[in-house]
Amino acid sequence: MLQMFSGSRCSTSAVVWSLVGCFLMFQLYTLVRQKDRLGGEIQFQASHHPQFHELEQVEEENIQIPPPRKRSPRAAKRKPRRPTTLIDEFLDENSQIRHVFFPQKLAIDPMKDTGNDSYYFYPGRIWLDTDGNPIQAHGGGILFNEKSRTYYWYGEYKDGPTYHAHKRGAARVDIIGVGCYSSNDLWKWKNEGLVLAAEKANETHDLHESNVLERPKVIYNDHTGKYVMWMHIDDVNYTKASVGVAISDYPTGPFDYLYSKRPHGFDSRDMTIFKDDDGIAYLIYSSNDNSELHIGPLTEDYLDVTNTVRRILVGQHREAPALFKHEGTYYMITSGCTGWAPNEALAHAAESVMGPWEFMGNPCAGGNKVSQLATFFAQSTFVLPVPGFTGSFIFMADRWNPTDLRDSRYVWLPLIVGGPADRPLDYNFGFPLWSRVSIYWHRKWKLPQGWSGWKRI
C-alpha cells in the first residue's frame, strides 16, 4: 500500500514538474520571439534611412520574349522548335532583345554632366572610369582604406579578345592582370592601372597569359602592414584548381606574386576571402569538383592557410561565395554551377563563420520570376557594407557576356538584412531565427544622401 502510494506521489510530482517545465519553455520562447520582433522593429527604424524605404519597394520588370524567327517547313519538320526562354535570349548574341541585357547606347559616365542622373547606379549598363574607358574589374571585390578614406576596387582585367582554347573549352580571355580602381564615393572610379600583370615570356609561370586568373580579392593585414591578394589560379583546362597569393606595401601595388597551392590539399576554384572583426581572415572556396564549399582561417600574416578546414554546403554544388556579417551573424550569397549562364542565387546564415551554415532561400526580390531565378542575369562576387547604415549593403555581381567577356557588365543592387520580405520564410521551431536577406531589383538607384561617402564629395 505504501509502495503504491509512493509511486503515485512520484508520478504526480513528475507530471507537475513536466507542466512547470513546459510553461517555462513556453514563456522563454514567447520572450525570445517578442525580443526578436521588437529588436527587428527597433533595428528597422534606427538603421534605415527613409530613402532606403524606397529601395525596399519591389520593382517589377516585364521583358517580352520576341516572336520566333521564321524557319523553312523542312527545317521545322526535321527539328521541332522548343519554346524559347529568357535565358536563351540572354545567351543568344543575335537576340532581338540583346539590348535589354547589354545596353549599348547609354553608359554610366561620371565625368559627364548628367544632371539628375548623377550618382545613380544602372545595373547592366557600361560603366566608365574617369578616363572615359569601360571599367575592367570583373569577379572582383572592394577594399576600404581607413587611412586615406578611399575605396579600392580590384578585379579581372578582361580587355582582350574572347576565344575558345579548344572545341569543348570554355570561353576565355588570356590573362592580362588584375585591375585596380580608386574612389571616394563608389561612383567615380579612377583607373590605378594593373596592380598584378600577366607573365608573357615564362610559359611555366602561374600568371602566364595562357592560364586562368579569376576572382582576385585583397585584404589589409594590420600586423604586417601588407596588402594581401588571393585569387583563383588555373590552367586552360581548369585542372590545376589552386589559389594564388600576392603581396604589396601599397593598395595600388605593384603586387609581388608569391606562389600557388591547393589549399588543405583540396582542389579549389571559385573563392573569396573574408576578414572578420577580430582580424582573423578566412579562405572560402568551391571544392570536390564544385560539389561543396570549404572554409578555413588564414595564418596571422594572411599568406597561407592553417591546418583547420570545415566542409560546408556538402553536395549542394554552389560557387561564387560572397560573405558578410551583420550584428554577429554571418551571411553568404552563393551561385549555382552553370558556367557563364546565370542561375539562382541562394542566401545562407551561420552563428559561426566556420558553420554550420543554414539555407535561407532565394534573396532576390522584384524584376520578374525568371530574373529572380537567374539573379537578375548576374552572378555574385562581393557584398559591401554601406557606411553609416546598419543592415544595408551593396550586392556586387557580374553579368557575364560569354561571347565578348570584356563587355561583361556590373550589377550593383541594394541588399537589406532585416527588411520586409518579398515572401515569408518558413522557420521550424528552434533557434536562432535569422533575419531576412533581400536583394532588390532597380533599373536605377542611388545611395541616400546621408551616407558617409557623400560627405567627402
Image (spheres, rainbow, N blue to C red):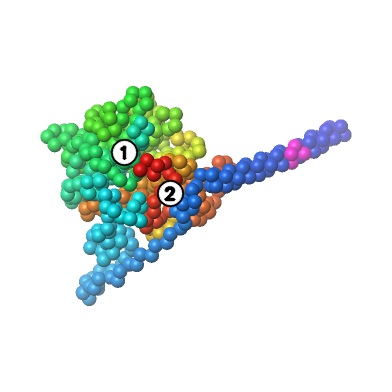
The answer to whether residue 408 shows anywhere in this view is no
Residue drawn at (57%, 45%), measured in percent from left and top? 42
- Picture coordinates of residue 264, whole percent (x, y): 34, 30
- Picture coordinates of residue 206, whole percent (x, y): 21, 34
Q: Marks 1/2: CA distance?
A: 21 Å
Query: Which mark, residue 152?
Result: 1
Magenta-drawn stretch, dominant element (helix, strand or loop): helix
Q: Quadrant of the N terminus?
A: top right
Q: Is residue 89 above or below residue 185?
A: below
Comparing 20 with 299, the one in front is 299
Q: Amino acid at mark 2?
A: Pro
- Picture coordinates of residue 179, whole percent (x, y): 24, 40
Q: Which residue is mark 2?
A: 448
Residue drawn at (36%, 46%), measured in percent from left and top? 396
Residue extending farthest bottom: 73
Residue extending farthest right: 1
Q: Is residue 255 above or below residue 269?
A: above
How crowded is the residue under tag 2: few (<14 C-alpha within 10 Å), some, or many (20+)? some
Comparing 219 with 8, the one in front is 219
Q: At numbered mark 1, what does the secondary structure look like: helix, strand or loop?
A: strand
Stretch of the chain drawn in magenta: 16-20
The answer to whether residue 236 shows anywhere in this view is yes
